[in-house]
Image (tube, grey):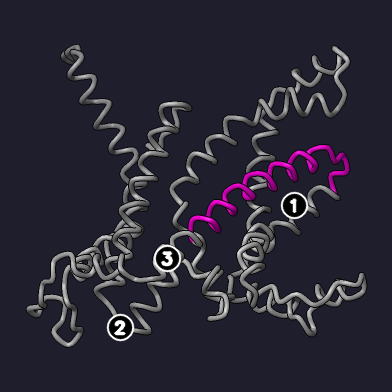
C-alpha cells in the first residue's frame, strides 16, 4: 500500500515552483552564456583601462608597469583646451537635432503610411525605407560624398537647374551639422517608422468605428484616436533617447567630416579618437571618455527611472 504524498506548505510550494522553473529555463540560460562571456571580455574587462585617465600613461610600461599617477591633471588639461566647449556644443546640438528629427519624421511617415490602403505599395515602401538601416556608414558615406559633391553630385546639379549655386554640404560649417542630421534620418527613420506602425496596429479598431459614427474624418481620427493611441510609445522612446544625448554618431561623422568643418562638426567621440590614436595623448583622451561615460550613465539611469515611474517600463 503506497503512502500518501505529504501536503506541501507555502514554503514547500515556493521551493517546488522555483526548482521546476529553474530546470525548465536552464537551456535558455545556457543559450545566454556565450553572449555574457563576450560582454565580460569586451565590455567589463576593458574597464580596467579607466585608470589611464589618472596616469601619465606610457604604453611601453604596460597597464600595470608602474605608471606615473598624476591625479586629476589630465582632467585639468582637457578643460583647459580652447576647443573643448565648442566640441561639447557641437555634440549636444547635433545629438539634440537627431533626437527631435528622429521622433517627428518617423511619426509623420508612419501616420501617412497607415492611411495607404494598397497593401503591395505599403509593404514595398516599408522595404525601401528600411533598407538603408542595414548599410554601414562606410558605404553610405561614399554614397553621400558622391551625390553631395559640389562639382559632380546630383544634388548640386539639381540646384544648378533651379538657379542655385553649388553648395559644399560636407565642407562648409554652416551646412555640415544639418547634413549630418538629414543623412542620419535617411538611414534610421525606416526602422523607427516600423516601430510606430506596430504601435498603430495595436489600437482597437472599434475606436475608429466610434469616431467615424460621430462624424470624424480621417484627420480627426488621426488626431483624436491614432496619436493618443501612440502616445505611450512616443513618450517612452523620447525619454529613453535622453541617454544618447552625448552620442552624436561617431561612425557617421568620422566617415564624412574633414578639418575644414571641425568648428561645427567635431564631436566628443571624434576628438577622443584624434587625441588617443593620432596624437597618442592616452591620459587626456581616456579622461574625456570617462567623463562622457559618467554623464551618459546618469542620463540613461534617469531616463529609465522616469520611464518606469511614468509608464511602468522595465527591462526585467
- Discs 2/1, front: 2
Where's residue 34, x and y in %?
33, 60
Quarter-of-image position of residue 78: bottom left
Q: Whole-Å distance between the Cαs marked 2 and 3? A: 16 Å
| Label 1 SS | helix
Quarter-of-image position of residue 57: bottom left
Q: Earlier in the sequence, mark 3 or mark 1?
A: 1
Where's residue 275, x and y in %?
35, 77
User: Residue pushed farthest left?
Assistant: 66
- Residue drawn where x is 59% and y is 53% of the image: 97
**Looking at the image, which is closer to me, 159 or 47?**
159
Q: Is residue 186 found left or right of 92 in the rendered image?
A: right
Q: Is residue 148 found left or right of 311 in the rendered image?
A: right
Q: Is residue 286 found left or right of 125 in the rendered image?
A: left
Q: Whole-Å distance between the Cαs marked 2 and 1? A: 45 Å
- Residue drawn where x is 7% and y is 78% of the image: 66
- Which part of the image, by quadrant, shows the C terminus? top left
Q: Residues within 10 Å of mark 3 (few under 14, many from 20)?
A: many
Q: Which residues are magenta?
A: 91-120
Residue 99 belongs to magenta span: yes
Where's residue 96, x and y in %?
54, 51
Q: Which residue is mark 3?
A: 268
Q: Residues within 10 Å of mark 2 (few under 14, many from 20)?
A: some
- Residue drawn where x is 83% and y is 76% of the image: 165
Residue 210 vertical placement versus 102 (above, below)? above
Residue 233 vertical placement versus 31 (above, below)? above
Q: Which residue is mark 1?
A: 126
Amino acid at each position: 500500500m503506497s503512502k500518501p504524498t505529504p501536503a506541501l506548505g507555502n514554503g514547500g510550494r515556493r521551493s517546488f515552483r522555483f526548482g521546476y522553473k529553474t530546470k525548465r529555463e536552464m537551456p535558455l540560460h545556457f543559450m545566454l552564456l556565450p553572449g555574457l562571456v563576450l560582454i565580460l571580455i569586451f565590455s567589463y574587462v576593458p574597464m580596467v583601462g579607466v585608470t589611464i585617465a589618472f596616469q601619465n600613461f606610457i604604453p611601453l610600461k604596460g597597464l600595470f608597469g608602474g605608471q606615473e599617477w598624476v591625479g586629476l591633471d589630465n582632467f585639468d588639461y582637457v578643460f583647459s583646451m580652447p576647443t573643448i566647449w565648442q566640441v561639447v556644443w557641437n555634440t549636444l546640438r547635433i545629438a539634440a537635432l537627431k533626437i527631435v528629427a528622429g521622433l517627428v519624421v518617423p511619426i509623420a511617415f508612419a501616420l501617412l503610411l497607415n492611411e495607404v490602403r494598397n497593401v503591395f505599395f505599403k509593404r514595398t515602401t516599408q522595404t525601401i525605407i528600411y533598407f538603408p538601416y542595414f548599410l554601414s556608414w562606410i558605404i553610405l558615406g561614399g554614397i553621400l560624398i558622391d551625390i553631395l559633391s559640389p562639382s559632380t553630385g546630383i544634388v548640386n546639379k539639381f540646384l544648378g537647374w533651379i538657379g542655385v549655386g553649388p553648395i559644399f554640404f560636407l565642407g562648409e560649417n554652416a551646412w555640415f551639422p544639418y547634413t549630418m542630421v538629414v543623412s542620419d534620418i535617411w538611414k534610421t527613420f525606416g526602422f523607427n517608422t516600423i516601430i510606430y506602425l506596430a504601435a498603430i496596429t495595436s489600437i482597437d479598431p472599434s475606436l475608429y468605428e466610434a469616431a467615424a459614427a460621430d462624424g470624424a474624418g480621417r484627420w480627426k481620427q488621426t488626431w483624436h484616436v491614432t496619436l493618443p493611441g501612440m502616445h505611450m510609445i512616443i513618450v517612452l522612446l523620447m525619454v529613453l533617447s535622453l541617454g544618447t544625448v552625448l552620442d552624436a554618431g561617431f561612425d557617421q561623422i568620422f566617415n564624412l567630416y574633414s578639418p575644414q568643418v571641425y568648428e561645427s562638426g567635431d564631436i566628443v567621440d571624434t576628438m577622443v579618437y584624434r587625441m588617443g590614436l593620432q596624437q597618442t595623448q592616452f591620459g587626456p583622451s581616456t579622461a574625456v571618455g570617462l567623463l562622457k561615460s559618467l554623464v551618459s550613465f546618469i542620463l540613461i539611469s534617469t531616463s529609465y527611472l522616469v520611464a518606469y515611474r511614468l509608464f511602468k517600463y522595465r527591462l526585467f
